[in-house]
Amino acid sequence: MLLLRGEQIASEEQAELIKQSGFRHERTTRLASVFEGISHQSASLAAIEKDFVEHRDRATLIPRIKVLARDLVDVADNDPDAAFANIHLEFVRSYTVVHSFMAALVSSRLALARGLDRAQRITLVSAALTHDIGFLARRKGFDASGDLSAEQRANIKCHTGDGVQVLQDLGVDDRLWLDAVRDHHEYLDGSGYAGKKEGELSLAARILALADSYSAMLRPRPYRERVVARTALETLYVDELARYDGSLLEILIWDFGFYPPGSLLRLANREIAVAIRNSPGILDSPRVASLTDPHGRPLVRPFARDTRNPAFAIVDTLDPAMAARSAKQIGECWSLDFTAPSARK
């Protein structure tokens, strides 16, 4: 995970140990193209969702999900931060598409850190991409503003079982996939939909439960406002620690930090910047790229900034939707040189 985040190998002995252990991934995709590639993949999920809702090509839905999950894992592994930032800054697709895609990316990263093999990760990502499929058939009226009615809340509680039934009807028989979908609203303390407790929940279900909750907090809905990432992590750790696997929550906190990739930030010099990568071992000083000058005017090209420098310290978290005006520059940010003098001055 540290190598994927840009951490350096300190010695030949470390490099040799990594090679012998098999932790080596040949990069075949340009870093900038990872950001672009996630856009194409989220479009694919939107098309799959549309076909499902409109009862078209259902025989092909699961094969398409499997291909998408495989491609998502491959592209995201090239640069997990660029992949997450893209979907964090996505405000064109529907909530269900963005939420499912974000949950899939988070699940993939947690699963990698917990040692799941590639095949298991692809299956878990498939589960994340389809974890709300039972909700899609019942979603009419959920886009309206205002609080949920009792009937709507009851429908939401049915979506896990409905989802398993839909997936089985579509030909899914993989237990990891089905168990994760069925139990993604079950928690270690028994406070979930069916009241299952710690010993009854698989690792895949625990991963998806945490990824689902974290991803849902970061996106606004008509009946619930968006929560900034720092607040989301504090809520999960302070108020809801008993519900989630502590080891997974620790991975989530240290991997994403208080300002995960794609967070839009205001710096001390008044520039608006986007978080590029969490700094290993540091929660609150990510590597960022400035998108505007201090007067809010878009820059021709983004500049790398070091937020540990007081001149570029983070002073506020902004609505990610504000990044739309700098969309052309954002894709370049993951190719910036953070060792350049401009990042420190």
Image: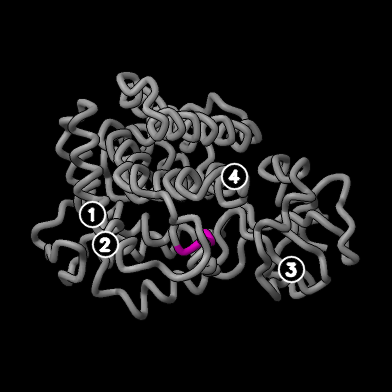
Q: Is residue 226 above or below residue 132?
A: below
Q: Is residue 219 magenta?
A: yes
Name the chief secondary structure element in magenta.
loop
Q: Is residue 101 left or right of residue 321?
A: left
Tell me the mark number nearer the camera, choosing from 2 and 3: 2
Check disc 4 and report its element: helix, strand or loop: helix
* Left or right: 160 in relation to 303: left
Please name the residue that numbered disc 3 is placed on: 266
Earlier residue among tags 4 and 2: 4
Instruction: Say what amino acid the circle numbered 4 marks.
Output: Asn
Q: Which residue is mark 1?
A: 158
Q: Residues within 10 Å of mark 4 (few under 14, many from 20)?
A: many
What is the CA distance from the residue labelled 4 to the residue labelled 1? 31 Å
Which residue, given by chain and number where applicable, does mark 4 sit on? 86
**At label 2, which amino acid type do we have?**
Ala
Write down the residue under mark 2. Answer: 154
The outermost residue toward the left is: 199
Residue 184, x across and y down, in percent: 26, 54
Mark 3 residue type:
Arg
